Amino acid sequence: QVQLVESGGGLVQAGGSLKLSCAASGRIVSISAMGWYRQAPGKQRELVAAVTSGGSPNYADSVKGRFTISRDNAKNTVYLQMNSLNPEDTGVYYCNVLFRSGNYYWGQGTQVTVSS
């Protein structure tokens, strides 16, 4: 079994910054990619950013230039540095880990609220 523990969410004013962290533990074998998704009220969950085991990042168009995803393979941890936040970034942010086997796991979610 795999556990994902997220941290770093909170309330911030527009223009501010937050950094999310997600640490994976348990049966960790051959992670393929780690990423962050978010779900705003009344909307579907969407990909924010992901990074492969080789370090190649992928970003949603709405966050390019503002968010940076990084990964510490030794610690099985993925980070999301979020700058220039705006109210449209508000939502529950979920960590996701995809293994080479095709199995994937979700974190419990962390709330990010950006006030205008």
Image (cartoon, grey):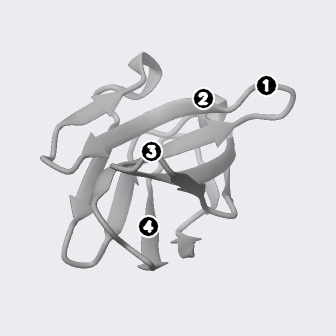
Amino acid identity at mark 4: Ser
Q: Quadrant of residue 44?
A: top right
Around disc 4, counting alpha carbons within 10 Å, would you say few (fewer than 14), some (14 to 19), or many (20 or more)? many
Per the model, the C-alpha gap separating discs 1 and 3 is 26 Å
Disc assigned to residue 21: 4
Tell me which residue sits at (32%, 68%) in the image: 29
Disc assigned to residue 102: 3
In the picture provided, is 94 more to the left or to the right than 108?
left
Tell me which residue sits at (45%, 44%) in the image: 102
Closest to the observer, 107 or 82: 107
Closest to the observer, 42 or 5: 5
Amino acid identity at mark 2: Glu
The x and y percentages for residue 78 are 35, 61
User: Which residue is most to the right?
Assistant: 42
Residue on which disc 2 sits: 46
Disc assigned to residue 43: 1
Amino acid identity at mark 3: Gly
Mark 3, secondary structure of its residue: loop
In the picture provided, is 49 more to the left or to the right than 31?
right
